[in-house]
Image (cartoon, helix red, strand yellow):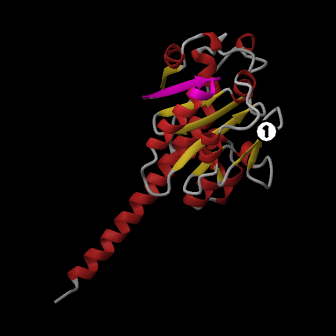
Amino acid sequence: MSELLPLSWLVKASTYNLKIGEGTVITTVTDREAIAISSISALRSELKTPDPFVGIDVVNNGDLLLFHVKNRCLIIQFNRMMLLDCLTDIPSPLSEFLGDKSITFIGPKKLCQNSTESYISGSSGQKLVLNRIVDVGYLTGKLCKKPDLLSSTLEELLGRVGIDIKKPVISEDSMRPDWQSSSVLSEEEVKYAMYEVHSCYQIASKLITNATSATASSSSGTRAFVFGSLP
């Protein structure tokens, strides 16, 4: 029924301001191509730093395609969108976003181990090709220089880097057996769906910020030593 609503109404109805931990995540949930494209543009506008990274996750073989950048999350009901908008090809802005050679996508281990190739298959056979995707466990183990983290669960990784994000609890009666069955998701369902992508992004953000700060401090200290040694 969402196709019967004006686009401006859909934009407002698709936005959730979710309180997670101490922060608020502005989350867009959509099954329409136009909103997905405008939301991808909004995410791109946040990627102004060198070597930008984006949190990514996929639920139920493309029922949900999730992206996270800073305090924004986009959840595309991908399979539903392809059906409702009668799409035979993946929208170009989405393909270009996933294939952008400047972006590193960081996701859970289950996503990164699906294939030796970097792609995600939708239920209708569409293939979403990614230029670069990194397992958050590998990223954590590499930057922390801790091999044991390579096999850690997401909850263990959160604990090791000092991030307190509790996995949402949702009753079995409230669980949606088919994520593409409705255009309306409750706040509890949205929080549950975005738990992994939010966690992956927060872990990556903290690790990369710390690594960048340490590199900057080291470089600054080196320059100070050199300058102090001059006659």
Q: Which image quarter is the C terminus in?
A: bottom left
> Residues in magenta?
23-34
Residue 43 on the magenta span: no
Give amino acid for label 1.
Gln
Question: Is residue 25 in the magenta section?
Answer: yes
Q: Is residue 218 above or below residue 170?
A: below
Where, by quadrant of the figure, is residue 64 drawn? top right
Task: Identify whether 210 is placed above or below 89.
Answer: below
Residue 54, position as x, y percentages in the image: 55, 45
Residue drawn at 67 percent across, 17 percent down: 170
* Residue identified by numbered label 1: 126
Q: Is residue 133 left or right of residue 209?
A: right
Residue 168 on image: x %, y %: 61, 23
- Report the quarter where the N terminus lies: top right
Picture residue at 71% right of the left edge, 46% below the top: 109
Q: Looking at this view, is 169 or 186 the one in front?
A: 186
**221 relative position to 43: left or right:** left
Of residue 145 and residue 210, the one placed in the foreground of this image is 210
